[in-house]
Amino acid sequence: MEPSPGTAAPAAGSGDAQVQAVSDDGRRIRQAVVVIHGIGEQRPMDTLRGFVDAVLTDVSGYDTKYRSKPDAMGDLLETRRLQAPASRQEGRPQTDFYEYYWAHHMEGSKYSQVFRWMLWLLFRRPSSVVSALRPAWFASWGLLVFAIVLLVAGSWVDATSGSHLFDWLGKWIFAGGVLTFILQSIASYVVLGYVADAARYLTPNPGNIEARNKIRSEGIKLVRSLHESGKYSRIVIVGHSLGSVIGFDIIRNLWSDLRQPGTPHPQKQPELKAFEQEAAKLDAGPPTRAAIESFQQAQHRLWSEFRAIGVPWLVTDFVTLGSPLTHAQFLMADNEEDFKRRKVQHEYPCCPPAGNDTLGYETRYRIQQGAETIVRSVRVAHHGAPFCCTRWTNLYFPYRRWIFGDLIGGPINGVLGTGVRDVAVVPSTGKRLDGTLLSHVRYWTDGNAAQSAASGSDGTPSLKALRSALRLEFLRGKSARANSGTAP
């Protein structure tokens, strides 16, 4: 039996009290993890299986870490639900892992869609380019100018000297055909198979609207189905690469519908004020690890309070890996002023919420009990505040010296709020090659964590940080510091 939607969920890693394995009404506790893959022509379930194999430790007493079951929440029959049994030893309740697969909506991409996106990025003012991308931006301009100069110079030499530099393809038809085929294949694989995903999703041009809308609406439908199923006490959303932007969009759109209670249970709400006080501390100066830890505890207490008054929202944690949201100002707005305006207007929710709006406001509900109408009032958060009660942990490989670290991902704290917990990580494998640009696809690659720590790199092994950020073992009642997404 599963907990009902109105059951107050247990404290997931808050450290405030020992959490029991069943809810107050005696029903079993379950949690769900939704993994959203990044760019590329990948097959359904490849990302999820690799992810679950890595983050789950061996479960003693069972033949396998997880079982593959039908996915009744989504519409795509290619995906399955991977169910991990509860582990008393680890303090983990039964956990269902879902993959939100969206790559099929990007079929049929065209070079023109990528070209228009790249031109939009290239012709931005240099001052609007975030510092981490400036070397790549200037290098792109250099390559473009070099190609134009080479073309013009070659044409001029052909016209003046009669050397016909560009006629070799005609003389060597076979070699030219092979070279053209190879270059076209590489371009199609890289540009249309990978770059086009980002270009189409991040650009609201008319030709991209249908794909963007399908990706968002199906993701929202999946997470909404998890809420409405009544099976889960807690949901974690994990987004890798472009999947983190999709997860962000799912959260900001679904929150508007699930932030108010269906049936209110009025009571005192002291955690609203406590949260605002913790958020104010973050604004007082550069946020420290201890300040963010205290803030995340306040977020979770507020979530528990909202659940107690009847708010159906179950997403306790948002985990981003190699997220391009670190470049949100450059990728999702026309300039810095436009980006700030959208944050203050709550189009892009921040953690904590941006602007001077009061977080909680009173809402009255009329409840019909027989012939009598009873008025009940509770305080709920505004539409731009999903991260008042959803903790955000962001893992990234620091980018440096052109080829080391993750160029796509980076810190988000300060970009979309000062309450995001950024965790700088190193490859769990300890291999030097995995510390290059390849690190973008190495966030849950299993390996020798001891070797990684001994390599002299400053950071937490990525898989260790990921396991901690997921907080799957919240039934153990660990302290929040030991389960915060950072190294102990």
Image (cartoon, rainbow, N blue to C red):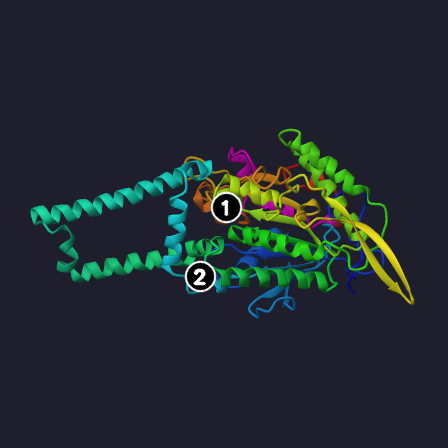
Q: Please name the residue shown 51% across and 35% down the image.
A: 455
* In the rendered image, the vertical position of residue 92 relative to residue 424, given as above or below: below
Say if the magenta span includes residue 304: no
- Badge 1 is on which residue? 333
Element type at mark 2: helix
Residue drawn where x is 36% and y is 58% of the image: 111
Q: In which quarter of the image is the N terminus?
A: bottom right
Q: What stretch is highlighted in magenta?
A: 447-474
The residue where tag 2 is placed is 207
Image point (32%, 60%), residue name: 185
Q: Quadrant of residue 273?
A: top right
Q: Which of 109 and 204 is in front in this view?
A: 204
Residue nearest the observer in this picture, 111 or 460: 111
From the top left corner, tell me how far across and down residue 91 is, in percent.
74, 50
**For the C terminus, which image quadrant?**
top right
Closer to the chain start, of discs 1 and 2, is 2
Left of 149 or right of it: where is 366?
right
Q: Separation of disc 1 and disc 2 at Cα?
A: 19 Å
**239 vs 17: above or below:** below
Q: Residues within 10 Å of mark 2 (few under 14, many from 20)?
A: few
